[in-house]
Amino acid sequence: MRYHAVLFDLDGTLLDTLADLAAAANQVLTDQGLPPHPVDAYRHFVGDGLRTLVESMLPADRRDAATVAAAVTAFQEVYGRTWYTRSAPYPGIAALLDRLTARNVRLGILSNKPDAFARLCVQRLLPRWRFESVLGQRDGVPKKPDPAAAFEIAQLLHLQPSQILYVGDSGVDMRTAHAAGMDAAGVLWGFRDKAELIQTGARYIVDRPEDLLPLVFSS
């Protein structure tokens, strides 16, 4: 077996959360009398943490510190009530996790989603599988692509980073893996495109969840 553990990004990799993220963000905008964005626009707004999402969705002339802080609070309130409305695992993810679990591959999640939301999503939408570590964005810990949290997970699993395959859908994920010394697999069913994944260091590009299996199990 080439890798002893698989470390997943969450949004855009395991879970399709785009519609709920966009709906909550657009609700915050319309409540402030600001124009909403098309759902697809949020493919490029998410992935780098909540504050970046909020700054990206706000008009350029409304990104002062006070407005951003208020919008972050409003988003947390709205999303906290509605995050599970349409979010679900991508097709093929359940079968992938079943196969990895059956072969005793260890599983973890590393996300830039706020930690409480990340854990809540996993508990509600991925309850069948044991993830040995689920880490979201936490105060005092640099967010991805800084490798600090990836190193933390490797230490928790008692594995070398080279024994872990990092799977994500964005350039942030690919850069995280590279900085941590992990091989990176970029997935094409998520929020970003193939060109971004290649440009940011993906070792592998996968079209479907089942395509990850030979990467993990080949010697």
Image (cartoon, grey):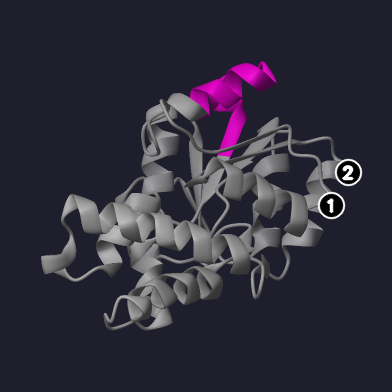
User: Which residue is rendered at x = 48% and y = 34% of the image?
Assistant: 138
User: Which residue is rendered at x = 55% and y = 72% of the image?
Assistant: 20
Does the image show residue 147? yes
Marking on residue 102: 2
Name the image quarter holding the C terminus: top right
- Residue 73: say if magenta: no
User: Mostly what secondary structure, the magenta segment?
Assistant: helix
Determine the secondary structure under disc 2: helix
Would you say the residues marked 1 and 2 are in contact, meaning their CB atoms lie under 8 Å apart? yes
**Neighbour tally class for label 2: few under 14, some 14-19, many 20 plus, Cα within 10 Å:** few
User: Which residue is rendered at x = 60% and y = 17% of the image?
Assistant: 155
Determine the secondary structure under disc 1: helix
Q: How far apart, in angstroms, are the residues tagged by discs 1 and 2?
A: 6 Å
Where residue 61 sits in the image (x, y, percent)?
11, 67
| In this rendering, position of residue 183 left or right of residue 36 | right
User: Which residue is rendered at x = 58% and y = 60% of the image?
Assistant: 80
Q: Is residue 82 above or below residue 118?
A: below
> What's drawn in magenta, residue-wise?
150-165
Marking on residue 98: 1
